[in-house]
């Protein structure tokens, strides 16, 4: 039995005529950059998450960089974030010459611990980037209150969490000063290439983001800022317009599978804690094993794809060590990085595939 970690082909077959027609429409009108589907998608994204402004761009990393640039982050500024995340979160901070200040995680949720943020704020702190890891939001409302009280902007890195809902009932990408997401194909809402978006409820920030994503132009050939060439192409927007219709059902299916996993692993394996009032979109379903290398090999031999998100905390990455990030200890993040592993949770897993994954996970995790 072959089990894909993410089954994009099966998803495509579910809506093939609709996707093919959307692509054909773009090929017919020929507006491959800046076509009407871009604005249509931005409208649908805002409707879905509740943010006033949605601005599509080329990818999730650009989205984060553009968000920081819109806040005029410069060399010497400090940006508080988690060390337990994909490299891009720290990378964009370093690209702007700013300093990443790492705050440890809550070992139950793997998200940044809000209770540890305020003590890290200095007169150089200009932003906080909480990451909604594995599709679960941290306490974004509390983090926003901390930011507002200290005159520090908050940018949600929602690359894995578009469609998630916080414990307080707010949608990911809707409540902080700025939020970002990724439409990389393997994300819960993904296109067939690279793509991303920036979200805000602030008109001034929205106008600035809009300018920065297009070479800093306020109008054609009038450049108010140094910007990027970061445009979502029209074909990707067309694909997302069809896939967002399917998205609520896929979130539901991911949660059904995740619930089955959690019930099967209860009291046997440590898994990410999902607060009862929150909705996770399960970009990954993550658990901990103490003998990870052996577990990975055994699962591979059984035909079950697994992945590690993430094996190295950011401060321990070679480049961050070269940049002077030494003697930075985040014990919960470092412990998690040695044990976490993710198993398939895509919405097209058959019941017999789920059963095999559960049985083999329990069998190998105990070995």
Image (tube, rainbow, N blue to C red):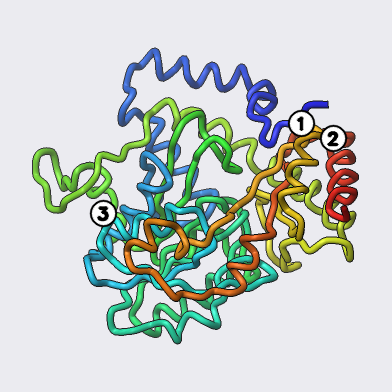
Residue 117, image x and y in percent?
48, 80
Q: In what element is the residue under mark 1?
A: loop
**Label 2 packing within 10 angstroms: few (<14), some (14-19), many (20+):** some
Q: Secondary structure at mark 3?
A: helix
Whether the residues at callouts 1 and 2 have beta carbons within 8 Å, the answer is yes
* Towards the viewer: 285 or 192: 285
State the CA–CA distance, disc 1 to disc 2.
7 Å
302 or 42, which is in the foreground? Answer: 302
Q: Earlier in the sequence, mark 1 or mark 2?
A: 1
Q: Considering only vertical position in the picture, is 230 above or below 276?
A: above
Q: Which residue is mark 3?
A: 207
Q: Nearer the viewer, mark 2 or mark 3?
A: 2
The residue that mark 2 highlights is 353
Q: Is residue 249 visible?
A: no
**Residue 80 picture quarter:** bottom left
Placement of 72 over or under 206, stated as above or below: below
Residue drawn at (76%, 31%), measured in percent from left and top? 3
């Amino acid at each position: 039995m072959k089990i894909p970690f993410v089954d994009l082909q099966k998803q495509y077959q579910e809506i093939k005529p609709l996707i093919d027609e959307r692509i054909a429409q773009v090929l017919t009108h020929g507006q491959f950059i800046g076509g009407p589907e871009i604005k249509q998608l931005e409208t649908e994204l805002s409707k879905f998450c509740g943010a006033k402004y949605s601005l599509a761009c080329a990818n999730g990393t650009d989205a984060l960089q553009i968000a920081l640039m819109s806040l005029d982050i410069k060399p010497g500024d400090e940006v508080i974030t988690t060390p337990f995340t994909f490299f891009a979160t720290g990378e964009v901070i370093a690209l702007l010459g700013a300093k990443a200040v790492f705050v440890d995680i809550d070992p139950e949720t793997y998200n940044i611990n809000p209770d540890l943020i305020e003590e890290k704020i200095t007169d150089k702190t200009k932003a906080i980037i909480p990451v909604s890891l594995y599709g679960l939001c941290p306490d974004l409302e509390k983090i926003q209150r901390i930011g507002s009280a200290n005159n520090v902007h908050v940018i949600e890195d929602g690359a894995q969490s578009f469609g998630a809902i916080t414990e307080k009932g707010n949608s990911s990408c809707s409540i902080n000063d700025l939020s970002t997401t990724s439409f990389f194909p393997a994300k819960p809402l993904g296109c067939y290439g690279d793509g991303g978006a920036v979200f805000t409820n602030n008109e001034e920030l929205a106008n600035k983001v809009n300018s920065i994503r297009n070479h800093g132009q306020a109008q054609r050939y009038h450049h108010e800022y140094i910007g990027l060439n970061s445009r979502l192409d029209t074909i990707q927007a067309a694909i997302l317009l069809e896939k967002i219709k399917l998205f609520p059902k896929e979130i539901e299916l991911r949660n059904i599978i995740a619930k089955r996993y959690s019930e099967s692993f209860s009291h046997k394996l440590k898994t990410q804690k999902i607060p009862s009032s929150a909705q996770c979109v399960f970009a990954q379903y993550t658990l901990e094993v103490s003998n990870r290398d052996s577990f990975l090999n055994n699962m591979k031999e059984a035909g079950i794809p697994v992945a590690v998100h993430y094996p190295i905390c950011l401060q321990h990455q070679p480049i961050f060590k070269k940049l002077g990030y030494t003697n930075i200890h985040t014990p919960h993040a470092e412990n998690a990085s040695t044990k976490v592993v993710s198993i398939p949770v895509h919405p097209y897993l058959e019941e017999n595939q789920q059963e095999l994954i559960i049985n083999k996970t329990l069998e190998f995790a105990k070995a």
